[in-house]
Amino acid sequence: MQKLQSQGVHHITLTGADRQTSIDFWEGVLGMPFVFEQPNLDNAAESHLYFDPGDGRLITVFTNEQRTPDPRRTPTEPGCVHHLAFSLSRATFLQAIERLDQRAIKHTGVKDRGFMDSIYFNDPLRLTIELASYRFEPPFGHTHSDVLLEAHRLRVARGEDHIAEVHLADAIEALVLRSRPSLSEDRIAKNPY
């Protein structure tokens, strides 16, 4: 028996309210270009809007002009989506609070997650949105996941509770050591001063 190997998220589709609410939020607040629209091919009463979240993949929304935003929180029972998280550059993340405040969008403020910082708020349909910014850049040829996997291994080996910046720094050093050859026979840390 073989796996069906995933190679990334293709798209995420949400049930929206009216068309303009979706455009105003996904493009007007989060800056995701509105790139494509067609009828929902499974339900002619709905339109299917496509937005680019910044990596060329897609967030899509089924809209219907008869639906309006509902002030109740979207369900979070087992099987339901808890929240969607979007990556921001550090420069943009540092502006996020001010930009949310300018729109009077209630938010959590910055939450320290050890390896990243997060801000949470609700979209017009009360789905929780997370704005996330990593505290590190992976070394060339590696991904954020590579660094997190290595940092996790280091954290567990040290008996520590959660990933902190020291684990990230040590993970990056370990990945570089394994993936970048050197003419030096001895690559341990030194103090030349």
Image (cartoon, rainbow, N blue to C red):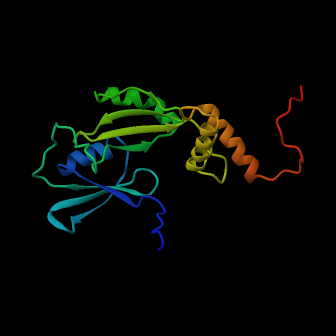
Horizontal side of 29 relative to 21 (left or right) equals right
At 53% from the left and 33% from the top, the residue drawn is 162
Of 101 and 70, nearer the camera is 70
For the C terminus, which image quadrant? Answer: top right
Image position of 6 (left or right of 177): left
Residue visible at 56% across and 35% down in the picture: 163
Q: Is residue 86 above or below residue 51?
A: above
In the displayed structure, would residue 2 be above or below residue 73? below
Is 133 in front, or is 78? 78
How far across and how far down the image is residue 67, in percent?
12, 49
Q: Position of residue 169 (x, y in %)?
A: 66, 36
Picture coordinates of residue 101, whole percent (x, y): 33, 26
Closest to the observer, 183 or 23: 183
- Viewer-proximal residue, 29 or 142? 142
Q: How many marks?
A: 0
Going by the image, does 28 lie left or right of 162? Answer: left
Looking at the image, which residue sits at the far bottom? 1
Rendered position, 111 above or below 87: above
Q: Classify residue 192 by image quadrant.
A: top right
The outermost residue toward the left is 66
